[in-house]
Amino acid sequence: MELVGKTVTKKQRPVNLDLRTIRQPVAAISSILHRVSGVITLFALAILLWLLSESLSSEQGFNAVVEILDGFFVGFILWGVLTALAYHIVGGIRHLIMDLGYCEEIESGALSAKVAFGVTIVLSLLAGVLVW
């Protein structure tokens, strides 16, 4: 390829397409999990709104919802949804703080991601106590 009398050569760089061998920094993992928790929260919100609608429709609807939510498996799913919601809120606050110009450097960004994970673990344990 020739541009204005100069020859441009294409660099032969190694390409790694095996995503299992790439080690992501903690801030990248935090950002990816924030997006995943948002998707989980979106779908869970639709189901929870349907359950709320059913429970408010009549006494039979309320009893049906209580029956649905009484099992261990559903409790486990509810705990997971609450954990995803907690992480999404904590991650969102982290991103808002970064938008204000704080914790934008690599070291402080990694530290804020670790703090977000820690706060989410505490909130997840509290959600577990609430569900069970």
Image: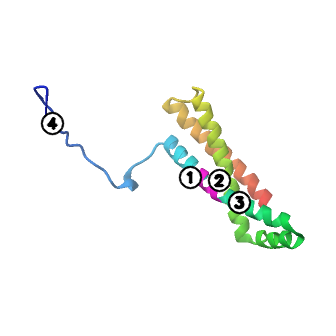
Counting residues from the N terminus, which is met first, the one under dot 1 or under dot 3?
Answer: 1
| In-front residue for pair 37/7 | 7
Kindly indicate whether the residue at mark 3 contacts the one at mark 2 (C-beta within 8 angstroms).
no
| In-front residue for pair 15/126 | 15
Instruction: Give the distance between the C-alpha atoms of the residues marked 2 and 3, in whole angstroms.
Output: 9 Å
Residue labelled with disc 1? 36
Instruction: Give the distance between the C-alpha atoms of the residues marked 2 and 1, in whole angstroms.
Output: 8 Å
Where residue 120 appears, as percent x and y from the top left, is: 66, 47
Q: Amino acid at mark 4?
A: Thr
Counting residues from the N terminus, which is met first, the one under dot 4 or under dot 1?
Answer: 4
- Per the rendering, the mark at residue 79 is 3
Q: Amino acid at mark 2?
A: Ala
Instruction: Give the distance between the C-alpha atoms of the residues marked 2 and 4, in whole angstroms.
Output: 48 Å
Q: Amino acid at mark 3?
A: Trp
Counting residues from the N terminus, which is met first, the one under dot 2 or under dot 3?
Answer: 3
Instruction: Give the distance between the C-alpha atoms of the residues marked 3 and 4, in whole angstroms.
Output: 55 Å
Q: Pointer 4: residues within 10 angstroms few (<14), some, or many (20+)?
A: few
Can you say which quadrant of the picture contains the N terminus? Answer: top left
For marks 3 and 4, give the one nearer the viewer: 4
Q: Amino acid at mark 1?
A: Val
Magenta-drawn stretch contains 130: no
The residue range painted magenta reads 38-43
Residue labelled with disc 4? 9
Residue labelled with disc 2? 84
Instruction: Give the distance between the C-alpha atoms of the residues marked 1 and 3, in whole angstroms.
Output: 16 Å
Left/right of residue 77 with respect to residue 2 in the rendered view: right
